[in-house]
Image: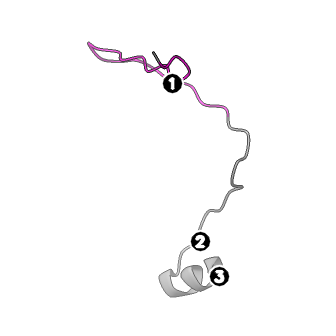
Amino acid sequence: MIARLQLDLGKPISTGEFGADMKVSLLNDGPVTILIDTKNRE
């Protein structure tokens, strides 16, 4: 499928690994931060 998309679009298609370990950072730049804790179900 990726090869076909590249051929049809004429551009390279980036791929990745499903479930791969990712390093993600977050910058809170707004007036409100909402924290959702899904482990505490009361």
Q: Is residue 33 magenta?
A: yes
Q: Is residue 29 left or right of residue 16?
A: left
Q: Is residue 42 left or right of residue 17?
A: left
Which class describes the residues within 10 Å of circle 1: few (<14), some (14-19), or many (20+)? few
> Where's the N terminus, which quadrant?
bottom right
Magenta-drawn segment = 23-41
Q: Which mark is residue 38?
A: 1
Q: Of label 2 and label 1, which has the lower sequence position?
A: 2
Numbered disc in front, either 3 or 1: 1
Q: Position of residue 20 (x, y in %)?
A: 73, 46
Q: Which mark is residue 3?
A: 3
Q: Which residue is mark 2?
A: 12
Q: Is residue 36 left or right of residue 1?
A: left
Disc 2 to disc 1, C-alpha distance: 38 Å
> Where's the C terminus, which quadrant?
top left
Q: Of label 3 and label 2, which has the lower sequence position?
A: 3
**Towards the viewer: 38 or 23:** 38
Q: Position of residue 36 (x, y in %)?
A: 43, 21
